[in-house]
Each structure stands twice: as C-alpha cells, then as structure tokens.
Amino acid sequence: TQLLEQSPQFLSIQEGENLTVYCNSSSVFSSLQWYRQEPGEGPVLLVTVVTGGEVKKLKRLTFQFGDARKDSSLHITAAQPGDTGLYLCAGGGNEKLTFGTGTRLTIIP
Amino acid sequence: DVKVTQSSRYLVKRTGEKVFLECVQDMDHENMFWYRQDPGLGLRLIYFSYDVKMKEKGDIPEGYSVSREKKERFSLILESASTNQTSMYLCASSLTTSGSYEQYFGPGTRLTVT
C-alpha cells in the first residue's frame, strides 16, 4: 500500500512569515499534485510536478518534486490570510491517486 | 475550465433512507471518482469508474453502490443510510490520456444521517 505522509499536520503562523510543508513516501510516483481545500469546499488543484527535481512556482508558492520522485515540498513566501486552508498532496501512478494526510494551515492576520 | 458539479451542497436524511448523490462533469473525462472525507481519516476512495457502465471498488465500498449510465454523470447510492455514513462526499473526474492523473473535484455534499 502506498502511503503519503505530510508534515506538519497543523501549522499556524503570522501573516508575512515563510513556511514549508512536506510530503513524503517510500514509493515512487510518476506525478505529484498539490491541492488546497477551503472549509466546506472541494480540493482545488494548484500544481502538478512530473519530473524528478522539478521546481514550479505559482506566485508566492514554490513546489519541488524530489529527485527520486518519492517526496515533495511546498514553500510559501510571505504568507497571507488567503493562504489559509488544508493542503493535500497526491501521488499518481495510475488512474487512482494516493492522497496525503494533509496539512492544515492557518495564517493569522 | 473543468467543471464538476454535485447535486446538493447539504443533505439531511434519516437512517434507513435510500440516498442518491449525483455528480456531473462537463469535460468529457473518462474517469470519475467518489470519495468521503472525515476528520483525521483524510480522503478515502469509495468507488471509481473508468468508462460508462464500468466501476471498480475503492477502499471503502461497503454500504455504497454506484451508477454510470452516461459519460458525464456518476451517481453514488446509499442503499440504506446509516449514521456512520454522515460525512463530506466529494466527486472528482480525470482524463485518462493526461498522463499526470490530475483530478478535478466538485464542491462536495455534506451529508448528515440522523
């Protein structure tokens, strides 16, 4: 069974600070997605990374896929209250995704 | 933009009732999925379908069935609702040929069984 562990599970920081959340597995994935979910809504796809070592930037968010395609990180620069939400990573290898355990992020104004 | 819609945002049903949750996607995606999401348990796959009239069990199919008569529509059925099926239900779709397995989610249905 493929598992994706995310850390930290909860993170609460002040507006303007930087943060990194991690997504780790012992399995290799052919792609990895990051989603953000706001309360009462469905997850929204933020980014997909497919190449080992790949780095993608989305405004203040930087996503990295590990060289061995087993892990990923999400770095947020100068966090804003709008970044608050549940961040989920998901690994792909076939039609079914393996979802991580999630990081619940709260940005305090 | 991919759009996945779910028939209800909130639903309250009584124990023993038959419940239908509907999901429609407008992007001609082959694959459709039903998940439930519970605090501390994350997203758990109930069923998925990779083509019309095709279905496969996910991790927690007990107490649920599905129907896919048309490519754009995937229904989740609770034959006899029970209180332990109170949850957030999420539908998703994906394109087989994308190669990246990205899934696009609906807004969710929060089901309460009393």
Image (cartoon, rainbow, N blue to C red):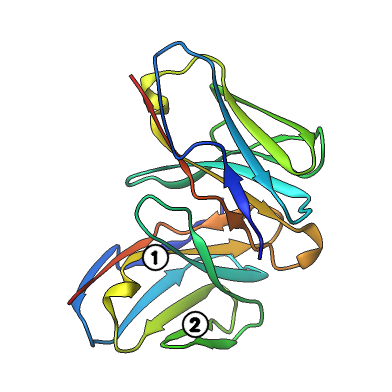
* Residue situated furthest top in the rendering: B16
Q: Residues within 10 Å of mark 2 (few under 14, many from 20)?
A: many
Where does the image place residue A39, in percent across and percent down from the top left?
34, 54
Indicate whether B105 appears above or below B45: below
Q: Nearer the viewer, residue B30 or A67?
A: B30
- Identify the residue shown where x is 81% and y is 42%: B51
Q: Nearer the viewer, residue B114 or B1?
A: B1
- Identify the residue shown where x is 33% and y is 47%: B40
Numbered mark located on residue A101 in the image = none
Report which quarter residue B94 is drawn in: bottom right
Instruction: Give the residue type at disc 2.
Output: Phe
Instruction: Give the residue type at disc 1.
Output: Gln
In the image, taking residue A93 as reference, residue A27 lies left or right, namely left
Instruction: Determine which residue is flagged by label 2.
Output: A63
Instruction: Determine which residue is flagged by label 1.
Output: A6
Report which quarter residue B52 is drawn in: top right
Indicate whether B65 appears above or below A1: above
- Identify the residue shown where x is 71% and y is 39%: B73
Where does the image place residue B61, in percent across and percent down from the top left?
58, 30
Please state, as top left, top right, bottom left or bottom right, where the N terminus of chain B lies in the image. bottom right
Where does the image place residue B107, in percent across and percent down from the top left?
49, 50
Q: Label 1: state its secondary structure.
A: strand
